[in-house]
Image (tube, rainbow, N blue to C red):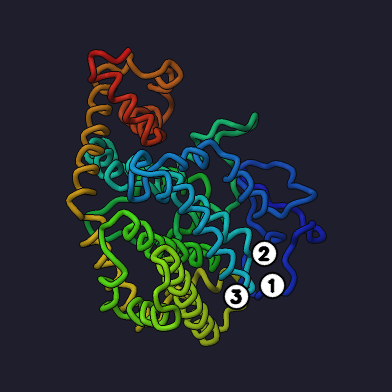
Amino acid sequence: MIHQPERQPAPAGAVQGRAPYASDPARSRGRLYAEPESLTRTVFQRDRDRIIHSGAFRKLQYKTQVFVYHEGDYYRTRLTHSIEVGQIARSIARVLHVDEDLAEAVALAHDLGHTPFGHAGEHALDACMIDFGGFNHNDQALRIVTKLEGRYAEFDGLNLSWEALDGLVKHNGPLLPLKEGTVLPITIDAFRHEFDLELTSYAGIEAQIAAFSDDIAYNTHDIEDGIRAGFFTLDELSDLPLVGDIIREVTGRYPGLESGRAIHETTRRLIDRLVRDLVEESQNRLAVLAPHSADSIRQAGRPMVALSMAVASAEKELRHFLNTRLYHDYRVNRMTSKARRIVADLFDQFFAEPDTLPTEWQVRIGGEGPSGTKPRVIADYIAGMTDRFAIAEHQRFFDFHEP
């Protein structure tokens, strides 16, 4: 049953000067399973801490952002990316006077459901699961925090607050009504009957902040990684709007600046411009709506957190450049081709011979509901792998000389 906590004095760490449209931990809609709340942390601080201490969060250290872990120690992984998203989200939430801990919690959790090898692995696993409900990393993140994390004596998952789950599921917008020909992901569809996340509405403002923080982080930091990997140079970015202006500022003020410093100076200024524009546009939208509660944000009918039209257009051009010159470069394509084969081979192996799964995963097959079907258990196992474990597991099965 849903636990609605009693109203108590704000615990240690509670935010003062909170905007009326902020999510208030003292008025949380509660958790799916009743449990005593902490005397030293707010509801949302506890959500954040549970995410950080989860096994799925630790595994992000060895999951692909763009470059597979063995291609270099300096490139970002899903873990470093998530930490950077959390920092940006917390900073924006502070300026907008909303709950920093909830924004950070959603930011840290947003990639928990990713497979090994990033989107390449996700697409391969989705193809394997096409006849069994498909695979979606947002849906998998919900599975992890509600079912797969087995850490607590009294419940499966992390038992996060309604607001954290609302943000995790809907940070990119409402899920209902569905577009023609689409269906809800399997876990989200089942969970809404246990704990109504109001899928027709937008998420709270903190989750909207987390979603844009993700965009800001991966666009700017993928510039750094792309240049360091030799896919393009700063000069090749100079014709792009916004980025080009910043590059000219940096080279004009610091002529002859060493390459690594020039790259960092450019990306940090780009983050600052994007954040300042996001804050200004969001404040303008909030001034028009004049929301009086967190629910006013959810029912607004459009996002309250956004970039201005001009900056959104510039960001779109940057994304197109990165798609062409980085994400779909032949060198990345070769690695993603290998990644897709590894995931598909492992799925086919376990599907044909489920007795080759680890014993603790074999016993999950035949469990109650769709979560206990053989293909879903196999998908859960593969999705939880790190890049290096998936590579090693593939070698163990398909290299005759491996033990």
C-alpha span from label 2 to label 1:
8 Å
Question: At numbered mark 1, what does the secondary structure look like: helix, strand or loop?
Answer: loop
Identified by mark 2, the residue type is Asp
Question: At numbered mark 2, what does the secondary structure look like: helix, strand or loop?
Answer: loop
Q: Which mark is residue 18?
A: 1
Q: Position of residue 90 (x, y in %)?
A: 59, 64
Residue closer to the observer: 288 or 196: 288
Compare marks 1 and 3 and give the one earlier in the sequence.
Answer: 1
Q: Which mark is residue 96?
A: 3
Q: What residue do we see at 55% from left, 65% from top? A: 206
Front label number (1 vs 3): 3
Q: Is residue 194 above or below residue 16?
A: above
Q: Which mark is residue 24?
A: 2
Is residue 149 found left or right of 5 in the rendered image?
left
Compare marks 2 and 1 and give the one earlier in the sequence.
Answer: 1
Front label number (3 vs 2): 3
Q: What residue do we see at 51% from left, 44% from top? A: 194
